[in-house]
Each structure stands twice: as structure tokens, then as C-alpha cells.
Amino acid sequence: MNPERLGGSVTIAEAREQQCLNQRNSKLQKRLKIEEEKKRKKEEEERENQKFKDQQRQKAEQQERRRKHEDDRRREQFAPDHHRLNDRFLQQMSSRNAPLGIAEPTPNTSVTPKVKMSLKEQELEHKRTNTAFLDKLERQMKTEMNICGESSSPSQSPPEPLCSGRTAGDGEPNTASDFEWALMKLMTKFPDFNKDALEDILNQCSGDYEQAYELLSL
């Protein structure tokens, strides 16, 4: 009996070759199995990540919708306060720009003005108001001077103090420094009046601070 044939019809070389093939196939199968397992885990992780991203996006969209809803509700809630603050600001600006401290009529706080006067129209309105006020002051000054003239006696040789508060010995008008000092005192006493209006009044009073103060205090 041929010893190479012991144990079956397959020779030792064939048996070894078959064994090597089986080992290679086994290693290849294990490697394929490992690769498939890695691929499956990777796909599962990607699905989990995508699911997590979708959940986060949904939460962000919900928060954004909730925030917009809160903003709209808050805007509707504070809309009256917002209009009231705007009206108050416009009123303060109007009173600050109003000439001679004459306050403009208070606007309705419930309705926001839709039409605003142009800057040129405002300047014209301020100029008309200044002119009317100065005319009124001039009429008052003339009336007071007439009253003082009627009350004084013509037989008196030394002249009495004038209605302007200056004596006859003061004949000439105040100097520039006196005029500026009187203007500064009037601006301090009447901060609501603008400088040009106070200067016009002081000029009409011949620089007399006392007379200008009395007229403005009426």
C-alpha cells in the first residue's frame, strides 16, 4: 500500500493545499464580515446623527416660531406705550423749538400724527409767531408809555423817571457789555425763550433789563 494514500484517496500535498485554501477563505470571510460590521455601524451612526440633527432642527424651528410669537405679542402689548413715548418725544421737540416759550397745543396721545410740517413751514410758523408776540409787546409798551405820559404833570420842571425804568440822566443807551450782561440775565431768568427773541425784546426796551423783565413776566 502506498503510504501517501493512507487515510483516504487525497494525498498529503492536496490535503495541505486544501487546508491553505480553507484558511484563506476563512480569513477572507472574517475580513468581509468585519468590513460589513463596520459599514453597518457607520450607517447606523449616520442615521442616528441625521435623526439627532433633524430633532435639533425641529427644536430650533419651534423656538424660532415661539420667539416670533412672543415678539408679536410683546409688540402688540407695548404698542400704546411706544406711541405714547413717540408723541411725548415729538411734543418735547416741538416745545423746545417753539419760539418765545409759547407751547404748542398738546397732540392727541392716542393717534400718531401722520403728516409732519416741513422744516420751511415750521420756520415760517415760528417767524409769524415771533412777529405776533413782538407786536403785542410793542402795543403794551405804547399803552404803558401813554399812561405814564398822561399821569405826569406838565408843570414839573425836572423830568420824572421814564416808564422804561431809566432816569433822564441816563440819556444814552447802555454799552455793549451792559447789553450782553442784561441779555445773559434774561436768558437765565427765562430759559424757555430763545436768545433772538430775548434780544429783540431787550432792543425794544433800549437795553433796560428791568423793563424787559417786567414785560416778560406779564
Image: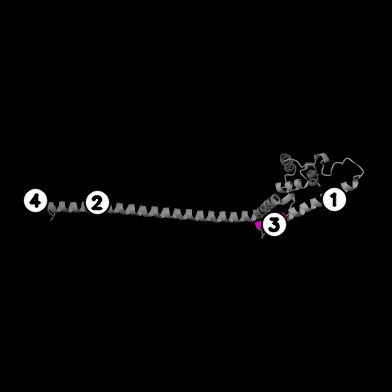
> SS class of the residue under badge 3?
helix
Q: Position of residue 135 (x, y in %)?
A: 78, 53
Residue 163 in the image, given as x and y percentages of width and height? 84, 44
Q: Give the residue type that dot 2 points to.
A: Lys
Q: Residue at x 75, y 45 (%)?
A: 202
Three-letter amino acid code at the position of disc 3: Leu
The percent coordinates of residue 87 (x first, y second) are 68, 54
Please tell me the numbered disc located at residue 124.
3
Q: Which mark is residue 143?
A: 1
Query: Which numbered disc, 3 or 1, marks the residue that appears first in the sequence?
Result: 3
The residue at the point 77 percent across, 48 percent down is 204
The answer to which image quadrant residue 217 occupies is top right
Report the residue marked by disc 4.
3
Q: Which of marks 4 and 3 precedes in the sequence?
A: 4
Front residue of 167/4: it is: 167
Q: CA distance from mark 3 to mark 1?
A: 29 Å
User: Label 1 to label 2, Cα distance in Å?
Assistant: 125 Å
Q: Residue furthest left?
A: 1
Q: Which residues are magenta?
A: 119-127
Question: Which is in the foreground here, disc 4 or disc 1?
Answer: 1
Q: Amino acid at mark 1?
A: Thr
Q: Quick check: is 104 in the magenta stretch?
A: no
Label located before the other in sequence (4 or 1): 4
Q: Which mark is residue 27?
A: 2
Figure coloring: one colour
- Per the model, the C-alpha gap separating discs 2 and 3 is 101 Å
Q: Which mark is residue 129?
A: none
| Mark 3 surroundings: few (<14), some (14-19) or many (≥20) residues within 10 A | few
